[in-house]
């Protein structure tokens, strides 16, 4: 230490030091009479040095020291640090102190008095008590909430359970207990053992995602009871700070079986329609050919009625052939496999436009095809989709300067194709039924059509978990929208 600073401290009055420390301090003699009282002690207790010095320290009515003073107790070792007591302030209120006590001894070791140093922690104690009360109150509320949740879950017919971050189940409702067995297993084994009879965590376990605040949907099969469940895994008790996972299951075994049966029935119906359509279509080609031959060779021998009859035979046969072709397209929608790669929808749409070039020239239409997103759909079905939408747009486009726009847009997990015309449009009441087989809008009167084209578009969208609808084009006309997943198998 610097010699000048050491000399200064040595010469600095002890009284001045004791009066400036931010801690209450007083000294007592062996009779517990106060012999010294500093300024901070005055501020904390309200008693001046003149009022305190000469009195026994018991005048403060300290608890517990008023009943039994521990300063000179031989049982308690000294110094005694971090004690808590309360005393009576001069204004009558009780204040709480944190203090340290020690004995004062002379050079021979004899006790000549005691010293107490203290600080006021009354406000801290109030905050502590207030916080403790708030915590206890919130704990009671959480218990009530938990009991309410338990009651709700127990009343559910769907199996439900809650597990912690270590996969341990600490709650299962009665419906779940009916599946996994005795209550004794709850909390003793992890969920993958209790529910799925596995020795390791499931490969598709969603616990990590759920503890990050995500909701996860799964389809799980319990091989032991041969039942399949749709499971919704949710963060618990809150999405912000989850510590556990709530799993709620719904038995969908019958739904899956019904879906399988419906798919099988649809396949059989598609096969039936395909077979019948093919068998009925075969005789139409020679029928049309013979009618054309008869018209060519016997035209001079036929009167007007005969020629008109041949024309009607050809028209009816062509209409029948178109209908069967559309039915064949409709029937094959559910039979095609999903390709491994994405298909360039722009190229397909442009090819279909070339295929329909005669119709485009006939109605002098302007068709604009913008860049379209790629999609995983069989090329032939994508072609059918654009063939029907573009053919429909050309058929009902505006009579004067017809314009058709084909566009597409990709969202986060979906693709949307849009075909818009500026023709007469479709009445709002008819916009759903035009996608049903053989249903045509009132604006289609006088135009040739089978009523199968838009039904084929709807089935393509439906088979690939998509949707199709029609809206009014701004300024007039019909806008057909096909919404599909980016990549989805059947």
Image (spheres, helix red, strand yellow):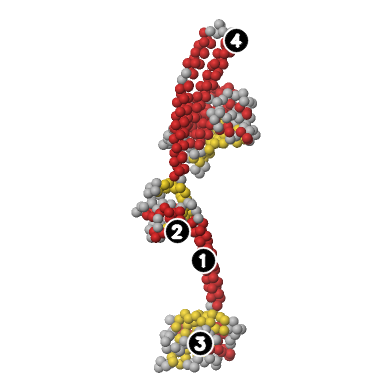
Label located before the other in sequence (3 or 4):
3
Please rate how many residues cluster around mark 4, counting C-alpha atoms within 10 Å: few if below 14, some from 14 to 19, many from 20. Answer: few
Image quarter where the N terminus lies is: bottom left
Label located before the other in sequence (1 or 2):
1
Q: Secondary structure at mark 2?
A: strand
Residue pictured at 58% horizontal, 23% vertical = 448
Q: Residue 3: x percent and y percent?
A: 44, 84
Which residue position holds label 2? Answer: 171
Q: Up-down: is 386 above or below 82?
A: above
Name the residue at the right extreme: 475
Q: Up-down: is 17 above or below 486?
A: below
State which mark lies toward you, 1 or 2. Answer: 2
Q: Secondary structure at mark 4?
A: helix
Label located before the other in sequence (1 or 4):
1
Numbered label attached to residue 304: 4
Left or right: where 446 falls relative to 286: right
State which mark lies toward you, 2 or 3. Answer: 2
Query: Answer yes or no: do the residues labelled 1 and 4 have beta carbons within 8 Å?
Result: no
Q: Secondary structure at mark 3?
A: loop
Label located before the other in sequence (2 or 3):
3
Q: Residue 67: x percent and y percent?
A: 51, 87
Query: Answer yes or no: do the residues labelled 3 and 4 have beta carbons within 8 Å?
Result: no
Which residue position holds label 3? Answer: 67
Q: Residue 355: x percent and y percent?
A: 51, 25
Please rate how many residues cluster around mark 2, counting C-alpha atoms within 10 Å: few if below 14, some from 14 to 19, many from 20. Answer: many
Which residue position holds label 1? Answer: 139
Residue pictured at 58% horizontal, 90% vertical = 51
Label located before the other in sequence (3 or 1):
3
Query: Answer yes or no: do the residues labelled 4 and 2 have beta carbons within 8 Å?
Result: no
Residue pictured at 50% horizontal, 61% vertical = 146
Q: Give the distance between the C-alpha atoms of the residues marked 4 and 2, in whole angstroms.
A: 88 Å
Q: Give the distance between the C-alpha atoms of the residues marked 1 and 4, in whole angstroms.
A: 98 Å
């Amino acid at each position: 230490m610097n010699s000048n600073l050491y000399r200064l401290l040595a010469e600095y009055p002890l009284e001045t030091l004791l009066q400036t420390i931010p801690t209450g301090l007083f000294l007592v003699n062996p009779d517990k009479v106060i012999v010294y009282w500093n300024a901070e002690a005055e501020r904390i207790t309200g008693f001046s040095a003149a009022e305190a010095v000469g009195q026994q320290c018991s005048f403060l009515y300290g608890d517990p020291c008023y009943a039994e003073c521990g300063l000179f107790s031989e049982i308690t070792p000294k110094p005694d640090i971090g004690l808590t007591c309360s005393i009576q302030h001069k204004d009558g209120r009780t204040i709480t102190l944190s203090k340290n006590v020690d004995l004062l001894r002379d050079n021979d070791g004899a006790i000549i008095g005691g010293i107490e140093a203290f600080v006021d922690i009354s406000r801290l104690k109030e905050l502590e008590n207030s916080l403790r009360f708030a915590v206890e109150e919130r704990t009671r509320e959480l218990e009530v909430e938990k009991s309410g949740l338990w009651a709700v879950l127990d009343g559910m017919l769907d199996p439900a359970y809650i597990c912690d971050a270590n996969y341990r189940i600490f709650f299962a409702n009665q419906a779940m207990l009916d599946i996994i067995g005795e209550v004794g297993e709850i909390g003793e084994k992890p969920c993958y053992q209790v529910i799925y009879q596995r020795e390791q965590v499931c490969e598709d376990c969603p616990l990590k995602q759920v503890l990050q605040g995500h909701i996860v949907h799964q389809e799980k099969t319990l091989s032991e009871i041969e039942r399949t469940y749709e499971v919704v895994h949710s963060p618990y008790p809150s999405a912000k700070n989850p510590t556990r996972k709530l799993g709620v299951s719904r038995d969908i075994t019958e739904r899956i079986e019904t879906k399988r049966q419906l798919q099988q029935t649809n396949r059989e119906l598609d096969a039936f329609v395909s077979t019948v359509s093919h068998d009925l279509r075969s005789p139409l080609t020679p029928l049309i050919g013979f009618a054309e031959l008869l018209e060519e060779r016997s035209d001079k021998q036929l009167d007007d009625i005969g020629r008109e009859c041949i024309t009607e035979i050809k028209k009816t046969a062509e209409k029948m052939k178109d209908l069967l072709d559309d039915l064949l397209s409709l029937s094959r929608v559910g039979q095609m496999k999903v390709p491994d790669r994405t298909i360039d929808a722009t190229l397909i749409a442009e090819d279909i436009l070339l295929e329909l070039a005669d119709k485009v020239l006939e109605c002098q239409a302007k068709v604009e095809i913008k860049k379209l997103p790629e999609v995983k759909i069989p090329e032939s079905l994508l072609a059918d989709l654009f063939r029907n939408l573009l053919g429909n747009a050309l058929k009902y486009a505006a009579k004067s300067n017809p314009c058709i726009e084909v566009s597409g847009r990709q969202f986060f997990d979906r693709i949307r194709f849009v075909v818009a015309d500026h023709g007469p449009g479709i009445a709002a009441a008819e916009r759903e039924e035009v996608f049903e087989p053989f249903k045509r809008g009132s604006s289609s009167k006088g135009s040739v059509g089978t009523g199968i084209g838009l039904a084929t578009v709807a089935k393509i969208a439906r088979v690939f978990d998509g949707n199709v609808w029609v809206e009014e084009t701004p300024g007039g006309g019909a806008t057909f929208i096909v919404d599909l997943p980016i990549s989805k198998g059947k």
